[in-house]
Image (spheres, rainbow, N blue to C red):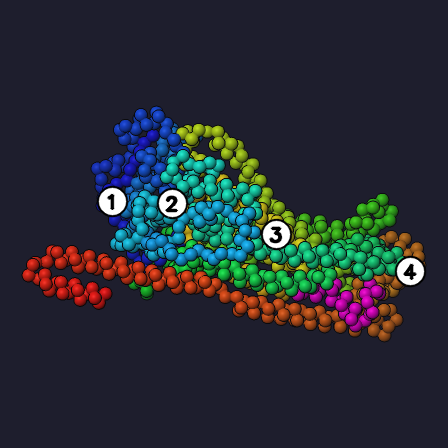
Amino acid sequence: MRRITGKAKDETLIELQSATDSQTGDGPAVLTAFRINLHSDENNGNGVPLSERTSLPGHAETDKLRPNRDTVFFRDGVRRIDFVLSYVDDKDGEKKQERRREFEANLEKAGLELETEDKSDSKDQKTYFLKIHAPWDVLATYADVLKIKVPFKESDIPHGQDVPLEWLSRPFRLPEHIMHPAPDYFTYPFDKTKTDFFLISDKDTFFPPSTRNRIVFYILARCPYYNEGRIDKEKTGIKRLLSNGTYTSAFPLHDCRYWKRARNAECESERNNLYRHWARFLCFYKEQPLNLIRKYYGEKIGIYFAWLGFYTEMLFFAAVMGVICFTYGVLSYDDNISSKEICDASIGGSILMCPLCDKKCPFWRLNSTCLSSWQSHLFDNEGTVFFAIFMGIWVTLFLEFWKRRQARLEYEWDLVDFEEEQQQLQIRPEFEIRCTNRRLNKITKEMEPYLPVTSKCARFCLSSATVLFWISLIVACITGVIAYRLAVYAAFASIIKDPKRKIQVVSRFITPQLATSVTASCINFVIIMILNFFYERVAVWITDMEIPKTHLEYENRLTMKMFLFQFVNYYSSCFYVAFFKGKFVGHPGNYTYMFGKLRNEECDPGGCLIELTTQLVIVMAGKQLWGNIQEALLPLMRNWWSSRKGRHNPENHYSRWEQDHVLQNFGQLGLFYEYLEMVVQFGFITLFVASFPLAPLLALCNNILEIRVDAWKFTTQFRRPVASKARNIGAWQEILNAVAILSVVTNAFIMAFTSDMIPRMVYLYAYGHGMRGYINNSLSIYNISRIPESNMPEDKDYLSDNSTTCRYRDYRYPPGHENEYAHTMQFWHILAAKMAFIIIMEHVVFVVKFFVAWLIPDIPSDVKARIKRERYLIQGELHDYEVERLKMQLSASFITEPQSEMSLTTDKHEVLSECL
């Protein structure tokens, strides 16, 4: 085992040009110049790679003793490991060795301290590990540059107020030391020249591990691997070294094994606390330790779990209301007169329906759809209208209350002064490397990289064309599924409705519409998963090709591309069933056809809502099931053996860096896919919830599992991610707002055009005395003798009762009428009622939405008051500090001045003190 330490601090020269960043998050501001003074040093190993340098005297005995290697400290037990790089020797070893030599030398010149573990000490006997420690001077320098907020006084503002009946929530609460792992402080951006202003009791622990690894990663991302004589801007940053295989991984360390606490008392063992109180499924009813999550993983991950937890809490109310609506449908089962008439042998059994397809479909009796009419009533009843209106208001309450929750977290997590605009200073290293053109910044008056307009336009056009191509591919696939539905329906109808086939028992429960809908939905789900697999990679590629300037811009562009694709991919089939199926059918003798051959689908006599429900359940439930299999079962099976081996290895043989090395890497887009999954689910439970009131219940059950699965992955399956800041959920907030507005429109149209609610209401209040006779009223009559031969069934046994007419679902005049087969006045009354319902429902919901949004302030009043008080106190503390500092300076100058000037200086001192 060999030990390498960093060089003297005075050899480090870091030039910090351009505006510094006042945010402390996801990636601090770009140092537009990261220059290292590469002075020669007689102690730098004379060009020998770090991994090949000899160990220091006295370490041979230490190696033999095999001390505890499950630690987060260097071998001296004092310096903390802030980051770890790993690499292996391979065929291209000389080039990579040269890169590592230059990179590690530059890291040392930047002030970092390094220590290498030889491959002979690793379990696989082939992996080297480079451990990195950032000493105080480096941390202080970059904390000043990045304006990282640090404590200067313990807060005297109470956390919260006593809640009435607090004892009711005790079973759901976690211990206080888990919920609030650190005291609350007043904070201020770190200033290296004012270290005595801050509460620095121990320099080794002043900056928490999450801040330390963020600073080190910032240095790694911008450190070059070329020497002073070879200026090559592309040879910069750990990301490039990882992509070309020079290093195999780069990660900060977890502080202990997740299933037990660390032996070292100086180690926080926060990972173990998170596992015991958060990541286990048995804790599903407990609150989340958001402060501990934020402390260990950073604000960006913390805000995701805060949002997911709040979303799940709000789903509880939607799920309860959905269950009530569904229960109403069950309880009103016996009062469903329409279904009774359909199932009645003397009514539904006597009605002969026209064929639903050409040639293969026979005439059929209405009572054959008895079961599907009962199923449709469960979701298509009077309660559905109320539930659709409720969900329109619920989504507004969810978004408004989340804004308030988010504002409270901003205050509690010290993000009030963190502005998203400051992320514009976070120029991505990839942008700096690939943009060789430079121009003068009119604000900073410094040269900065930029992308020419011609190149930007060309990249944008290529990106847009790629997105349009993939969206067109989705539309083509959906069209193919529709063609499948039209083609296979005739086959199912000829099999299920054929009296000669011995499947009468099955035909009672499975109609041709149901069989077609289920199989088409399954095929559509498979196509969705396949297209997702490919498009995710294409979206990342075209976003990289655009070369966004900042991390925020990169995430926003990728977010919009992915959500646009996912929106079309997941929801297009539901839009087809909801708004197109059964709407352009025509009538016997004048049917409409797709591609000139396939006759358009008709809805069931009970409406198309049950088919929309089937489509929604299969796609939504299938996506959630597949997502949970991918996130939980597959990683569990893949890592079961390695985890088992890790548990049975003694701590002194299986080091902390080796344990983390075998874990999965949490990529830069890890949270992106988590948000995307939840936002797609949000679309399902809002856009089409009128067709399936139990959708919020499914989402609630999934999210309860999702929280614990994600927590389990973060604590047991992933390496510790680099901590980063975020004050909100970013572009996803605007997407949620857009989906919420669109959901009002879609649910209004579903209730008007997909559901049978409006035709029933028109019949009830304008044409009948109660609902009796509604089925007969909603079916038009057609003369069988006038059906063209191309539409007639091949089997002639259907006319054994000498029927001369058949019925079809529409409002048209009967044969012999002067306007035969034209739409009746009832059709136009129903259409007017549908349009009126859409206008009324949209306006009512939108008025309530905007009133609620206006009524509920985005920032709670107590949070506003605390922010103002904290700023007032900070201003006072800073004033007092500067006064004391100036007094000390004046006192020092007073001591050094000649005796003759003492009286004059004393007068000046007194006058200045009074002014201050």
Query: Mark 4 = which residue?
Result: 803
- Closer to viewer: mark 4 or mark 3: 3
Quadrant assignment for the N terminus: top left
The magenta span reads: 747-775
Look at 90% across and 53% down and name the residue there.
Answer: 797
> Which image quadrant is residue 906 in?
bottom left
> Which image quadrant is residue 331 in?
bottom right
Of helix, strand and loop, which mostly describes the magenta segment? helix
Judge whether residue 795 is colored magenta. Answer: no
Judge whether residue 752 is colored magenta. Answer: yes
Look at 13% across and 58% down and name the residue there.
Answer: 894
Say which amino acid is labelled 1.
Lys
Query: Mark 1 = which residue?
Result: 9
* In this picture, residue 911 sits left or right of residue 118: left
Query: Mark 3 = which residue?
Result: 699
How busy is the neighbourhood of tag 3: few (under 14 within 10 Å), some, or many (20 plus)? many
